[in-house]
Image (spheres, rainbow, N blue to C red):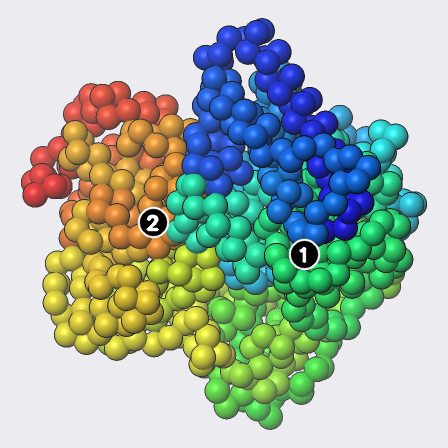
Amino acid sequence: MSKFILSAAIRGAHKIVDKCAAKLDEAVQKYGENQEISYPNTAYFLPIIYSLMGAEIKTLKDAVPIMNRCKELLPPEPSEKFYLPFLGPGLDAGLATLFAEEIYEAIRILEQPDFYYFGEDLIEKGAEKIWAGPADDVIMRKRGVEFVDGTAPGFAAIVGSAPSVQEAVDLVHEYQTKNLYIFLAARDIEGKTSVAEQLLEGGVQIGWPTRIVPFGPEISAAVFALGFACRAALSFGGLKKGQALRNLLYNKDRIFALVNPVSEIPDEWYANAAGAINWGFPTITNQDIPEILPTGICTYEHVVSNVPMNELAAKSIEVRGLKVTITEVPVPVSYGPAFEGERVRKGDLYLECGGGKTQAVELVTSKRMDEVEDGKIEIIGPDIKDVKEGSRLPMAVVVEVAGRAMQPDFEPILERQIHHLVNYAQGVMHIGQRDIAWYRFGKAAIEKGFELKHIGALLHAKYHQDFGAIFDKCQVKIYTEEDKVKEITEQARKIYAERDARIEGMTDETTEIYYSCTLCQSFAPSHVCVISPERTGLCGAYNWMDCKASYEINPTGPNQPIEKGETLDEKYGQWQGVNEFVYKASRQAVERYNFYSLVHEPMTTCGCCECIAAVLPMCNGIMTVNRDYSGETPCGMKFTTLAGVIGGGQVTPGFVGHSKYNVCQRKFILGDGGLLRMVWMPTSLKEELRERLLKRGEELGYPNLIDMIADETVGVTEDEIYPYLEEKGHPALKMESILA
């Protein structure tokens, strides 16, 4: 490491550790050593310390030995003749910096609980709070999935303030178009402004939904970015606390992150940059500082400087070794997944379609080859340019596809993609699907020339890119005439009903081919999800039809056909062919598992699951909790804790991950007694599944089953909910022992 950089990093580390140690001493004196400290709603305590050192920091007393270790890690402060030709002392100083800053930020949260907003909301200019603070585990798992499936190839941590507002906007915008997350921390050396504040001044929405996350105003907030990366390794990679080397290597190889200081760099920033290099995260800057060009810990160079602002994103991606694939989509606005969470507010609204204000419907249907003209886009009725600002229109988006490999089963797969693909257009917001779609078009998009034809253009381009293997031609018709929209809506509803009946009618017994999903193995190497007609993927994103379509589209992809073979256990759902596939695909880590049980050798679980079910022995039943519920549960663990315990591709008897939809499928834990074992779930999940729970309860002979299931309003312990179950006569109490 350069003499100058190494000296600056060590000096900065001494300053930070001294500051944080003084803060800890002050907090102990003020609150007492038994005062609890934490980051809100996480099972990973202070995640960098937890993941690398294995220490569970629960109180100020727990933090004292860690702070002492920080002091031990610090090399001597450099003198004029100081020189070491290797990175070791700087890396140690960097780790000491990060450990100390995690404690510092935990004390800040203790003393100023309202300093961070801890949410996933979008922040706009004039907002009272703009600093997000550490992500809770719900956000981390939800967003971490995007690093699993490749929609987010990595993140750029930007510190300081850009030379101008426009340069800040341009840098972040380029990262967005490359689909990266942008993590922001620290005002400039004078404390005047930051990239986060510059973006707000430039009219850019920031927050988790747009992948622009303003962690905090001090450099210490950089630990939230590195903590996010550490938790991803623990949650999705199956790593354990204290596995420092494995965690660092995992991040180097799988979490493609980098650091961009964009204003004058004080010693404290050098210390944090030295810490980031431990993870293989290089520093690329516009500032005039010495470079560290040889490879070693990072994939390529460690520090690259004097990069012009308009070249910074491209150079950073190159140095980090990211492989970014961008498809040109013929629309006049920026396009990519980073814009999916953007909101078009009332004050920015030009045109609205659907959303209860008017009727909006979407339909993908297959036609004969001679009925489709590839690339043809028709607008039947008024276009955007034909209406005034603030107008509303009905709308029907009809996509007609044709191809020798096209099958009716693929239609809903293509149709479901409309939501994401339209949302990728900057300034266009899409909510819902089928006949409850809702479009909002922003003024800025219209000013750039966006028209309804561009919906057809982007669908045509992306369908060919993503699904070209299953069709040859695609044409789009967009209707905005009220009578015609009503007519298409009625036609679409009949088709929706036919589709639902076709899928609902499939059973595991009558299907000889199941499908694998190994998409999450990039984070959980031993996890193998096997999907059948009556057991959807635990992430909720894939059902049997989806996997079939995926295999047709990409025969070498993560969704492979599995001949289930000989039935080994009909009750619990175990087949010879499935076992053989799982054993091989899990790299011999998992020999077998059951489809229909959480008590006996359940399926592996990864961090992407929508829900986790657990046995409640006292109640002779089970509970389930969805990731959106952050409260306590009767099994004694929150969702975040459960996911940490059973995630990573493990078979954990008594627990299993599953999708929301799976709860009401007929084979849900059938070997353990099925849905009649369900004694507790959060209110929000009950309401979301209400109609399906009512229907399934009637099928099982308990039409009021939904009312028999306890929730957090009844209690969050088995002792609290048991009297309720007795009062309601819950069937689980009369069934044979679930542990038999």
Task: Determine which residue is flagged by label 2.
Answer: 657
Residue 272, quarter of picture: top right
Q: Count the marks.
A: 2
- Specify the farthest residue to the bottom: 370
Instruction: Give x and y (percent) for residue 331.
Output: 78, 68
**10 Å crowding of disc 1: few (<14), some (14-19), many (20+):** many
Q: Which of the pair 568/693 is nearer the observer? A: 568
Contact (Cβ within 8 Å) of mark 2 with mark 1: no
- Name the residue at 69% across, 29% down: 14
- Name the residue at 72% across, 32% down: 77
Q: In this view, does 307 lie to the left or right of 735?
A: right
- Name the residue at 61% across, 85% down: 473
Residue 176, quarter of picture: bottom right
Distance between the Cα atoms at labels 2 and 1? Answer: 28 Å
Q: Is residue 538 above or below residue 268?
A: below
Instruction: Give x and y (percent) for residue 369.
Output: 57, 91
Instruction: Give x and y (percent) for residue 387.
Output: 84, 57
Residue 31 visible in the shown view: yes
Local secondary structure at mark 2 = strand
Local secondary structure at mark 1 = loop
Residue 589, quarter of picture: bottom left
Q: Which of the pair 739/448 is nearer the observer? A: 739
Q: Which of the pair 142/235 is nearer the observer? A: 235
Q: Which amino acid does label 2 sit on?
A: Gly
